[in-house]
Image (tube, rainbow, N blue to C red):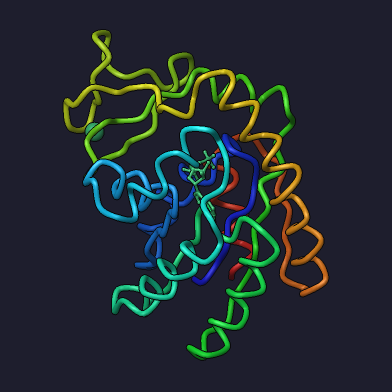
């Protein structure tokens, strides 16, 4: 499948994408994960992205497009991909449209995860992420806790709060979403690609995505 996952921070894009990758060999492409790995590795990209990310602001569009153009050309994307956290702005969506046309790739669907604001806020403050870059399993201290001493169940590394998950950065990320990303719902509606899903259970969302893709 070739899909875009849209939704506010905390809507569950990453969780759903991870569950869908096993379905038909499609790969998850998370610009957030790519950027966090670059920050950890201390690459040029990471050095540029770090400040924007910690403040809850978006990384400049051109930087993201360079990453995505290279990534979508990787051979493992042949079977399909799930874009998680990209596009994030109208210019990114327009650039993606051009890029896909150039690569002769057609999107199947754009899935919008429509989650109420109070649920989003609660999820973001209780979220923990495995600190092992090769794992990055997502936990929630209420609904899906790590081990009692805060370790990842899969790999044993500490499950930690992300640097951009302070209350201030979360508020900023939600503002950024409302201002820059939510207009994409309309954009993809007009493109005839949008499917909104308002379920809160990732299993149910996964089932609905599979049904929509056919
Ligand atoms: P979220 O949980 O907020 O959806 P992500 O892991 O997708 O988190 O992204 C974390 C941060 O990485 C964002 O706040 C932003 O700074 C940066 N980022 C990720 N994807 C993009 C993108 N497509 N365009 C610009 N910045 C991005
Ligand atoms: Zn782990």
The residue drawn where x is 41% and y is 27% is: 163
User: Residue 100, located in which quarter of the rendered image?
Assistant: bottom right
Q: In the rendered view, would you say 200 is above or below 167?
A: below
Q: Residue furthest top?
A: 148
User: Residue 209, located in which quarter of the rendered image?
Assistant: bottom right
Mark count: 0
Q: In the rendered view, would you say 19 is above or below 95?
A: above
The residue drawn where x is 40% and y is 28% is: 162
Residue 71 image offset from top left, x and y in percent: 36, 70
In which quadrant is the C terminus drawn? bottom right
Residue 78 image offset from top left, x and y in percent: 36, 80
The residue drawn where x is 29% and y is 79% is: 75
Is 190 situated left or right of 106 in this image? right
Q: Residue furthest left?
A: 156
Residue 1 image offset from top left, x and y in percent: 49, 71
User: Residue 106, located in which quarter of the rendered image?
Assistant: bottom right
The residue drawn where x is 61% and y is 62% is: 211
Is 131 situated left or right of 195 in this image? left
Residue 181 image offset from top left, x and y in percent: 69, 51
Q: In the rendered view, would you say 94 is above or below 156?
A: below
- The one nearer the camera, 1 or 82, is 82
Is 43 situated left or right of 107 in this image? left
- The one nearer the camera, 27 or 206, is 27
């Amino acid at each position: 499948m070739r899909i875009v996952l849209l939704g506010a921070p905390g809507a569950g894009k990453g969780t759903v994408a991870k569950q869908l990758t096993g379905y038909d060999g499609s790969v998850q492409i998370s610009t957030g994960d790519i950027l966090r790995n670059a920050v950890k590795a201390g690459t040029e990209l990471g050095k540029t992205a770090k400040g924007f990310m910690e403040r809850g602001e978006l990384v400049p569009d051109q930087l993201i497009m360079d990453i995505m153009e290279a990534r979508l050309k990787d051979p493992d994307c042949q079977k399909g991909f799930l874009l998680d956290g990209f596009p994030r702005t109208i210019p990114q969506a327009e650039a993606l449209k051009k890029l896909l046309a150039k690569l002769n790739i057609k999107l199947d669907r754009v899935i919008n995860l429509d989650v109420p604001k109070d649920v989003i806020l609660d999820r973001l403050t209780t979220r923990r992420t495995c600190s092992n870059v090769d794992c990055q399993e997502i936990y929630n201290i209420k609904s899906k806790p790590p081990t009692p001493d805060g370790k990842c169940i899969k790999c044993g590394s500490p499950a930690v709060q992300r640097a951009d998950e302070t209350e201030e950065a979360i508020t900023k990320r939600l503002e950024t979403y409302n201002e820059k990303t939510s207009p994409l719902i309309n954009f993809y509606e007009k493109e005839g690609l949008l499917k909104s899903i308002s379920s809160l259970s990732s299993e149910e969302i996964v089932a609905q995505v599979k049904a929509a893709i056919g």
